[in-house]
Image (cartoon, helix red, strand yellow):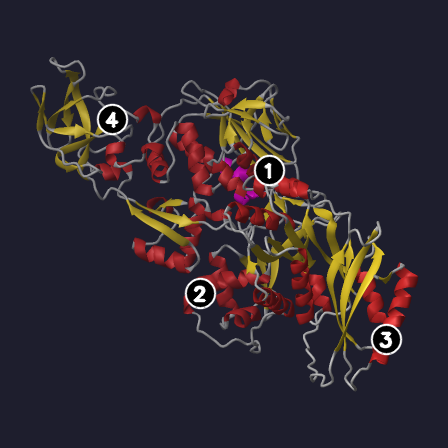
Amino acid sequence: MLLPISWSKEYIDIDKDIMEICDKVTLTGSHVESINKLGLDLNNIVVGKILEIYRHENSKKLWITKVDVGTEILQIVTGAQNLQNGDYVPVAKINSTLSDGTVIKETKLVGEISQGMFCSYKELGYEDSVIPKEYKDGVLRIFDENIILGTDIREILGLNDTVVEFEITPNRPDCLSIIGMSREIAASFNTYIEYPKKLSLSEIKNKSNIDVNLISNNCKRYSLAVLKNIKISESKRKIQNYLLNAGIRPINNIVDLTNFLLLEYGQPLHAFDLDKLEGNSITVRNAIDGEKVITLDGVERVLSSEDTLICDAVKPIAIAGVMGLKNSEVDENTKNVLLESAFFTKKSIKATSKRLGLKTEASIRYEKGLTPHYTLEIIARFLYLAKESMELDIDSIFDNISEKEENSILIEFNTNLIERLLGLKLSNEEICKYLSYLEINTQKLNDSLILCKIPNFRTDLSIPEDIVEEVGRLYGFSNLLPKPILAPNTIGRKSKNRAFEDKVKSILVGLGLYEITTYSFIGGNIINKSKMDVENTVKILNPLGEEFSIMRKSLIPNVIDVLAKNLNYKNEDMLVYELGNTFLSLQGEKIPKETKKLVIGSYGKYEFYYLKDIVVNLLKILNVTDYEFKRNINIDYFHPGVCADLFISGEKIGEMGQISYEVCKNFSIKKNIYVCELNIEKLFNYFNPTTIYKPLIKYPAVRRDLSLVVDKEIDSGDIEKIFKSHSNNLLKNIELFDVYVGEQVEEGKKSMAYKLTFQSEYKTLVDDDINEIINDMLSDLSKKLGAYLRA
C-alpha cells in the first residue's frame, strides 16, 4: 500500500516529521516497508509556457520554441512532436539536473542555440507503468489554471511529497486505503481524522428507470448512478499527481476519479459508457461455463460458472469485481456514464482472479474482504468531486440490496481483561478514550463492563481479546513493563507418543538402518505404478503439480521410489526406514484421518528373513509380546508367495513382503526388494516401557533338532504355536534353520528343520523331561497338521 503523505494530511492535522510518523505507526502495528522521498534528484526544473513554436528550417524533426519561464525567455530546440503554442511544460534550464543525474547544458542543435530542455514523465523520474499512454514518447503538458511561471516543477507535480509503503496484513482490508491508513496515523498520535465532503443524495430525483437484478449470490449490494452530459478530458493536476504518486496511471477525468476513490476509501468503482449499453436493466449473474469475453486489456477470457458477470439487457459488460469489458469502456467520445459501486463476496472474487490469472487493484481489495455498508456513500463522494472538477448532470441514483446488512458488531468488554492480559492498569475513561481514536463507540454498563460498538470497516474485531489488542497497541506495547508469567512453571518435555517414536528410530538406527524423509504428497502416477488403489485418498485443490496432487495414505510408494533411485545410483545394498504421516479421507468427515506409520525397505543382501528379523528385534526391544506373522496372498503389490501380516494380540499392525515383479518392472527395478509397513500408533498401544531383568539361568540348556514333513501350505507360525503350547515354560528358543523341497520328500510336502532350546530355572534337565515334551508336540502336530518326523 503506497501512501503519499501529502494526500493523507488532507484528512489529519499532524505537523510531524516523516520519520516520527513512520516510527509511531510502526509501534502501533502498521509495518513500514519503505520511505521514498520524491524529486530529490531534480534540480532547477520549472514550469514554462510556450510562446512561439516553429519548424527548424534545417531539420524535418526539430522545432524551435520561445519559452517564458517567469524570469526570462528561453530558446529551446526540441524533437517533441506533441507541443503547440500556449502549452505549459516542464523546462529543465541550463545546469538543471534530471532524475537520472543528467546535467543540462546550453548546446547547439543544427546551428541553433538550445538553452534547456523540455521534460517527459520518464525524465522526471516516473516509472513506465504509471506514465499516461499519450505521454509515453512526448513532453509532459500541464493543463491547469493559475499556474505561476517559473514555479519549481516538483511543486506543480507533487514531487516534493514523500510516499510511504506499508505492509498491510490480510486481516486489515480497511488499511488498503488512504482514509484507512490516515485513521491509523491519527489514532497513533491520539487524534482524529476529518472525513472528506460528500454530496447529499436526498434531493436527487431519478429521471431514468433502470432495473437492477441481483441473480448471483456473489453480489449482496449494487449501487449505481447515471451521469449525463460529461466531457471527457484530462483530470485536474492534483488528482493526477495523487494517482501517479500512489502508483496508478491517469487515464481520463472519469476513470481517474474512480481510481481516486478506490485509493481514498478502498471501495472499487467502475464506470460504463451508458450509450454502449443496451436496454434499461443491469443484471448480476453467474457466467456460463465456456462463456468468452474481452476485458479492458484486450485479452479474451474464458469463464466458468463460478465467475460473476455484470450484464446489460443483452450482453456482459464486466467481470464483477475484477475488470470491465472492452465493449463498455469509457473513452474520449463518452458523454453519458453509468457508475457502479457494489459489494461482491471475497471468496468468489478470489477464485475468479486466481483462475483467470488476473489481479487488479479492485480484485485485491475484494479478496481481502470489504463491507457492503458504504457503496452508496462512495458514490456521494464521487459526485462531490465530479461536480467540483467537471460539468455533468446527475440523472439518477439506484441502490439494490439482496440481503439485509448486518448491524454493527457489539462486544461486551470487561476492563479487567486489560490488566490480566497486558499487566496494565487503566481507568475506564482512558480505555474509552483510546477506543474512540479508532472510532469504536463505547457505552459504560457498570464499573467494569463496557459495551463496544465496532465500526463496520473493522471486520477484524469480534472478541474481547481484540479490544485488548487495540488498547495495547495505542498505549504502546513497547511501553508495557515486563512481568513474570502468572501460570505455574512447567518443564517442557516430549509427549509419550513422541518419545516412543524417538525410541523406535533409535532402535532402527542401532540395527543398521538409514533414515529417509520423503514428501507427504505424491502423484497418481506413482500410486498406479505401485498397484495401490486411490480410493479414500486426499486430493489437493491447488497442487504444485500433478506429481504432488495427492496426500499419501501409505509410505510404501515413497520407499519403493527411493529404492529404485538408489539402484540407479549403483548402490548395491540398501536398508532404510521412514517414520511419517499418512492421510485417509473418511466418508462424511471434513478432516482426513492422519496416521503415523513406519516403513522399512531393503534390497541386496537384506532379503525377506533379514527384514523379518529386524521387525522381531524391534518388537522384543519394545517388550511387545503375543505377536505372530500370518501369510497373506491377497495384496497386489506384494509377491503372493513372500508376504505376511503382523498381528499383535489378534490385531493387525502391519504387513511385509517382497514387492511383486510387476511393480518392480513399473519402477524399472531389476532386483528383489522387500518392504514392511507398520502402524506406529497401534504399536504404541502394546509398547511396555518397563523392562524386567532376570538373572541368568545357572543350569545348562538342552538342544534338540526336529525335522518335520508337512504340507506345503503349512506356515511355520502354526508349527511354532504347537511347540509353545507344550513347552511347560522350558522352551526358550525356536529356530527354523532349514526348509527343503525335493526328491527325498514326497510331492506336495516340505521338510522343515527346527532347533529347539530347552532350559529350566530350577534344575538340570534330563532326557526324560525333554522326551515327554517332544512326544506331546509330535502327537499334537500329527493330529492338527498331519506332520510327522522325516526319516
Asked if residue 713 is among those painted magenta in the image, a careful observer would answer no
Asked if residue 378 is among those painted magenta in the image, a careful observer would answer yes
Which residue is denoted by mark 4 in the rendering? 139
What numbered label is drawn on residue 720? none
Instruction: Give me the residue at 55% from left, 44% from top.
Output: 369
Which residue is denoted by mark 2 in the rendering? 475
Would you identify the image quadrant in which residue 523 lies? Answer: top right
> Is residue 459 shown left or right of residue 742?
left
Q: Secondary structure at mark 4?
A: loop
Question: If you read the primary sequence from the N terminus, does the residue marked by circle 3 or circle 1 appear first?
Answer: 1
Q: Secondary structure at mark 1?
A: helix
Question: If you read the primary sequence from the N terminus, does the residue marked by circle 4 or circle 2 appear first?
Answer: 4
> Is residue 106 shown left or right of residue 405?
left
Quarter of the rendering occupied by the C terminus: bottom right
In the rendered structure, which amino acid carries the disc numbered 1?
Answer: Ser
The residues tagged by marks 4 and 3 sit, at their Cα atoms, a distance apart of: 114 Å
In the rendered structure, which amino acid carries the disc numbered 2?
Answer: Tyr
Question: If you read the primary sequence from the N terminus, does the residue marked by circle 2 or circle 3 appear first?
Answer: 2
The residues tagged by marks 4 and 1 sit, at their Cα atoms, a distance apart of: 43 Å
Q: Is residue 338 above or below residue 166?
A: above
What numbered label is drawn on residue 348? 1
> Is residue 487 shown left or right of residue 154?
right
Q: Tell me which segment is drawn in magenta.
A: 368-380
